Image (tube, rainbow, N blue to C red):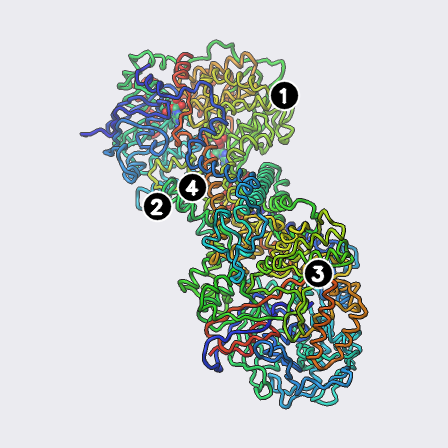
Amino acid sequence: AGPRSDDGGGSGGGSGASGKPRKGGTLTVLNSNPQEDFDPARLYTSGGGNVPSLVFRTLTTRNREDGAAGAQVVPDLATSLGTPSKNATVWTYTLKDGLKYEDGTAITSADIKYGIERSFAAELSGGAPYLRDWLIGGADYQGPYKDKKGLDSIEVPDDRTIVFHLNKPEGEFPFLATQTQTTPVPRAKDTGTTYEEHPVSSGPYKVVSNENDGERLVLERNPHWSAKTDEERKAYPDRIDVRSGLDSAVINQRLSASQGADAAAVTTDTNLGPAELAKVSSDKKLAARVGTGHFGYTNYIAFNPKVKPFDNPKVRQAISYAVDRSSVINAAGGSSLAEPATTYLPNQKSFGHTPYDHFPAGETGNAAKAKELLKEAGYAKGLTVTLTHSNDKDFETSPEIATALQAALKKAGITVELKGLEGNDYSDTIHSAAKEPGFFLAHWGADWPSGGPFLAPIFDGRQIVKDGANFNTGFLDDPSVNKEIDEINKLTDLEAAAQRWGALDKKIGEKALTVPLFHPVYKRLFGQDVKNVVISDWTGVLDISQVAVK
Amino acid sequence: MTTPLVQVEDLTIDFGTVRAVDRLSFTLEAGAALGVVGESGSGKSASASALLGLHRGTGARVTGTVRVAGTDVGAADDAELRRLRGAKAAMVFQDPLSSLDPYYTVGDQIAEVYRVHNSVSRRAARARAVEVLDRVGIPDAARRARSRPHEFSGGMRQRALIAMALACEPRLIVADEPTTALDVTVQAQILDLLHDLRRETGMGLLLVTHDVGVAAESVDDVLVMQHGRAVERGPVAEVLGAPRQPYTRELLASVPRVDEKRAGVPGPRTATEAGPLIEAVGLRREFGRGAGRVTAVDGVSLTVHAGETLGIVGESGSGKTTLGRMLVRLIDPTAGRLRYGGTDIGSLPERELRPFRRELQMVFQDPVASLNPRRSIGESVADPLRAAGETDEARIRDRVRELLERVGLDAGRYERHPHEFSGGQRQRIGIARVLAAEPKLIVCDEPVSALDVTTQAQVISLLAELQRELGIGLVFIAHDLAVVRQVSDRVAVMRQGRIVEQGVADDVYGSPRDPYTRQLLAAVPALDPVRAAARRAARRELAAA
Amino acid sequence: MSEALLVQEAGAAPAAAPASGARQFWRRLRAQRAATVAAAVVLLLFLAALAAPLLAALAGQDPDTYHPGLVDSAAGGVPVGSFGGISADHWFGVEPQTGRDLFARVVYGARVSLGVAVVATVLQVTIGVTVGLAAALGSRLLDQVLSRITDINVALPLMVIALGLLAIVPSSFPRPVLIALVIGGINWAGTSKIVRAQALALKSLDFVSAARLSGRGRWSIARRELLPSLAAPVITYAALLFPVNITVEAALSFLGVGIKPPTPSWGQMLTEADTWYQSAPTYLLLPAGLLFVTVLALTVLGEGVRTALDPRAASRLRIGTGREERQERTKERAS
Amino acid sequence: MTGFLLRRLGGAVFVLLSLTVVLYAVFYVAPGDVAQIACGPRCSPAQVAQVTAQLRLDDPVYTQYLHFLQGIVAGRDFSTGTGVEHCSAPCLGVSYQSDQQVMRLILTKLPVTGSLVIGAFALWILLGVGTGVLSAWRRGRITERLLTWLTLAGTATPVFVIGLLLIIIFCSTLQWLPSPTYVPFTENPEQWAWGLLLPWVSLALIESAKYARLTRSSMLETLAEDHVRTFRAYGVSERGIIGRHALRGALAPVIALSALDFGTMFGGAVLTESLFGIPGIGRELVHAVKVVDLPVVVGMVLVTGFFVVLANAVADMLYALADRRVVLS
Ligand SMILES: Nc1ncnc2c1ncn2[C@@H]1O[C@H](COP(=O)(O)OP(=O)(O)OP(=O)(O)O)[C@@H](O)[C@H]1O
Ligand SMILES: Nc1ncnc2c1ncn2[C@@H]1O[C@H](COP(=O)(O)OP(=O)(O)OP(=O)(O)O)[C@@H](O)[C@H]1O
Ligand SMILES: [Mg+2]
Ligand SMILES: [Mg+2]
């Protein structure tokens, strides 16, 4: 499913107010989505999330730097990125010295094991599926409440060492270790589903209050956190005040006004909309307070080749030729908020981006070529199809994009009828092998900045799920693709792996199972007192662990 | 007195193209009383309203000058006019039922008016309200002051309005038909009260009435109006004693006399072959619950035969209207039996009553409230015809026109609405509607009280004619004993919810047995002003004794 | 007959035939200038909506064609040019982001918005008046049942039901009709409550008793005696419901159960334009302005109809009812 | 009067019961795997089985329903993983998607929505009736025209436009007010009021238009009646007539309607709540509907329904008091 979009992100970045960042003050975070889940087991956020990462430290974490450098994984609680066995099926981590919880007790490797085990409990579901898939015995494990014995594939030979036994080679395990499931949870303090009301902090801040299911969060310094064991988090402000549940127009309005407490405010989930961008770009002062980020993310058209007429590759190609990317990009907010995509993989180095454009549609679509292909496919008189999209107003899979496509395909003689579905219904429908429509809008975001979690769930034939959530929407089960995925997974040299992911992407692209449309660009306002704005390509949004307000 | 209390010169009032009052001039001195008599629709109410500037803000066009108690009504600004209204000159309206606010208690409404002109506490104003209610003869005034208008009988509401007029001790009272709903004893009481006030406080009185007897009894001068113009004016004795104008003579000739027997009709039918048309046994009706309970009608038994007229007279608030409404089943009896043509209709549900509905009709006491202000009068009259299943529009129209003309209205006014008619005209519309239903029994609740004597005579002869033709049974409720005697075969006298005396009309009038009946007869106003004065003196002595 | 009276009558309107109720109504309506203007505006709006394809063709545009060249992509898609891109081709400018012609969208949008609102309002008023009258006039039991049904109706949120219905009704069912039915079928409680309250008060009046004595059934009484008096509050309320219905349609679109894109509607345009008020004000002002004009015109018209329905207003409006008084007077005297 | 009250109360209970039946029928007897829907898309088969057991979804429909009712009346127990949690009466179930007791969730939202609705209600009645009275009084004059235009602008403008404009004007441009936020009354009454001021005003501006028009129209009706003439003829000032007599007659429809609006506002102030970031019931309900969190949807509709029913019952009683004739007839 990709990470929670409320914490999406990318690269580039601004600088914010000038001057050296200093400690102190209160940082206000104005968000639209409440932090409903604050249990490390239930969180599904890229790189440990933004707000959660202030409270939860993980085995590894993302590099807190601007741009492409930020797409690297670095050690956090562990001393290194992990020591793999020769075929990358056993990963060993050693914890740093002197790690403490907010109550001063020491963090042990057993707590990390317990934290991971908890995430297998049915009551605490919601996290990324990788641990269940990769750990030996993970598929059958019921969690520590039901199955007191624990998971044998995680060993803790001593208080500072933890060893993971995987059922297959996974060179990207260090990336997985950035997820909050690897946060230590002291067994004695575990209160099950209510743990999220006051999770025990291992990071620079602890939860002081959590109201209305994460609508209002107040974090204050954790006195037992030591900057010496944590090179990534800067923790300048004394206090973090997260207010969510706000209308996005209001958030942007408040950030641009930057009055009172809002001068030291940022948002971690609200982009500038097209209309707001139009206003901001005409105001130099405001424009200086916009952070721009790129997150590994692609919006595309997906086909189900089991449904007529999309079983015919010519039809899929015709549509690929007919799309008008400039209209689509305008619908998504214009060239400042979206970049045209012809590749499935995001246009970032860490993903191994390899440029290609198999069915060149130009900027506004190649209707003639499309018509030609349709004729070959036996639809000389045109074609009527139904495009399924979501009703969520997100400028991604939303009605605006669908109508833009509708208008473009009309030029190629394809009549498009739209079918909008409610958020949940939409994701259920497109991810159900039985109900999947033939032609729909979809998007995919990276769980971490690498080709693996981008390509494997969608194109690995062994990941087709008959009942339950299926992400291989094109039902691609090509032995050569499957084999290449396995091969790349064995690599622990991430750069070498990236190159091969890129090549694989190019190869899959020829099948026209998807039509990449655009990669979003995130533009977000921050208050005028905000300093040290860092936006990595990993998350695409400013990192609040780096922000200072003094 | 140098300037008269009221001075009217060349008053002309137009409603659209209708000229209601045409160059009327008159004066009234303080302490004097002027009676305005004349046929229905002759512009009496319109002139009276003009005295208080009540046409202001309506569509009426008023020219000429009107000066009241030193105020030039035409030129005065709103504030000045407000100071005049109520405090210096007060008005008693013709339609008592709709002239009170249904949401407030009667006492509060009087108190409100009092407080507008006197800066006193709420409590003092309420006390004043009770005082004036008591003065106009509302029994148990302190308690009844807390009733809302719909809990009052017609006469009680009229008296409440008079009380309101009295509350501020104005220098002029303009009373528009103030006694139409009052029985003669109460009427006499009210007229005496007005007379006394005039004496004691020098109050002026402009009394609009169609009842020459009432005028004779209580005013010094009379003004006779016809078609919006004054036809004759002079001291009451002169005008009534030796009328100069033919119209005045005509008017006087039509006045019914209480000592006159019913003419032209054979005596009451004693033996009836077919049995009674309607028969009530022990009818009883209570209103309210607990402490506020009122027994409006208490064990009344009566019969009415086809072709017969039963007159009902009695004190105001004695339950006449309530009884009448029960007879046509507009309200349900609390107890007792009601048989109509062999069917017990006393407890029939609405649906089963339907077949009888059109046969039992009622002429309502308040003509204003009984007509839908939003429907043309023609349509209202056509209702029973349509309900009877008539669908031919032309036939309906013809019949309605015929009926309107029969009650003395211009058939051309079919499309007009109730507010465009005078009080008497509305009353006649109500009668026309009743006739349209071709009923077997008509309960007439004060059917002629709002009519001038000529029209009254006309309507009465109309009813008699219909009765002869169709054999209709009539229940005739009225406070005018003379009229009742004229129309009734038998008479019932009501008091406090009970029938105190019932019998053949001439017997009751000729040799009344119940003391209350005697009291009633003694209170009938006399046409001769001299005799009227003598009787007033007698009444005062009686009261003093 | 005095001279004065003769002069008076000479000036009077020579209305020979008696004016019928409807004619009097029109006369009273026409006597109000504001109401006449409002009626014209309403008529114009509805005509424009009906003739949307014609008007759009006249402008040489259609509501669905994208003009990517007419918006500034780098600036979020604001229309190029001043006043939202108003030009000889695009009379009202173009839509931000897509460049679709706003004139065409506005006239097509009028179709959906006015259509849905009219049907929904008519439905609400019909159901509301029927239920309210039935509750006021029926037996005590009927009153209880209907009042409680009204309460249940109020207690069920529109949105929840709309989403539920959407799941059941096949998508082949025309969407605007469905929406009108949903809004109309759900939001009638206000009307019914008002009608019930008023009817209860009116019921006790003598003219209703008189009508009962005429032998007329309950429904005939309700129609002829009560409805005319209820018309005033109902018309006022209906004029208020109308714009609410337009915005409810917008809200439903917002929730994804409204009109399907790319069909435009004013409500939808308003929702979308909301954020554009600063960078492309015309985009917001157009639907907002039109909605305002519609509401204003309807309210003034409603007010006019209300006044015209009241026969007592005739004198206030200074229209003669055109009857010859002399005739009547002579007759009365003669008899 | 007592009889009337009892009857009214019985009616209210009946409405609430019917509401539970309707809701249960719509949501729990709907086609599809109810347990899966209630549990949410991310639920594992084990969890779904647990939900099925808890909601007794394998039983016949009426037992399910009775069980649901029993929960409301007597409370229920739920497993949390680490143990068993008791959900005391009135128990509206547990949201499997957010792991909260629905009643608790509602109780945290109720004061919020309550603050919004009650404040706005007071304001809109004041504003609406006031404007209506004023325009009836000044009928035909320039004041009335002005008020008419204003109120119409109110009805014709959606709340998200008005609200946003207010924020821009008062918070950003003039900077007279802090950005609207919700601070509980118990925490700081002053901030509570300041934070809610704009939401109140926006809601009131939109709602009051209706009341203004309605009040005006009913008052004009009353002003045409005969009894008003009586008080004019006694020198009662126009103000007195408007204030005492005409207004009184206009109250019936206003009371009937205000109860309706007051009640529905509890679940229906969605747009206002989300625009101003007020964490109230309306917003939660929309969210729950969108993610099909069945227990929350049903629970919230029941609770808002409760307020609607309550408000209506109160209005009926007020109305009966205001016009005794209704009860007597
Ligand atoms: N508002 C009005 N519009 C049109 N015509 C009216 C209006 N009010 C009164 N009239 C007409 O003016 C004339 C005089 O009416 P007015 O009420 O003064 O009569 P009246 O002498 O008081 O009669 P009655 O004794 O029957 O009450 C009547 O013909 C009546 O139809
Ligand atoms: N709806 C009611 N509620 C309470 N009391 C009522 C009601 N209607 C009538 N009454 C009372 O019943 C008694 C009889 O009233 P009714 O109207 O029958 O008198 P009436 O004989 O017609 O008097 P009048 O000649 O003054 O019209 C009065 O005391 C009156 O106050
Ligand atoms: Mg008169
Ligand atoms: Mg009576």
Residue type at numbered disc 4: Ala
Tags 2 and 4 touching, CB below 8 Å: no
Residue identifier under label 4:
D246
Mark 2 on the same chain as mark 4: no
Q: Which residue is mark 3?
A: A302
Could you tell me which chain the residue with mark 1 belongs to? B
Q: Nearer the viewer, residue D211 or B311?
A: D211
Query: Which residue matches tag 2?
Result: B124
The answer for how far apart the CA atoms under marks 4 and 1 are is 47 Å
Q: CA distance from mark 2 to mark 4?
A: 25 Å
| Residue placed most toward the observer, D294 or A375 | A375
Residue drawn at (67%, 80%) of the image: A185
Q: Amino acid at mark 3?
A: Ala
- For the residues tagged 1 and 2, is the chain the same? yes
Which secondary structure lies at badge 4?
helix
Asked whether the beta carbons under mark 3 and mark 1 sit within 8 Å of each other, the answer is: no
Q: Position of residue A13 (x, y in %)?
A: 54, 74
Horizontally, is D75 left or right of C330 in the view?
A: right
- Evaluate whether residue D150 shows in this view: yes
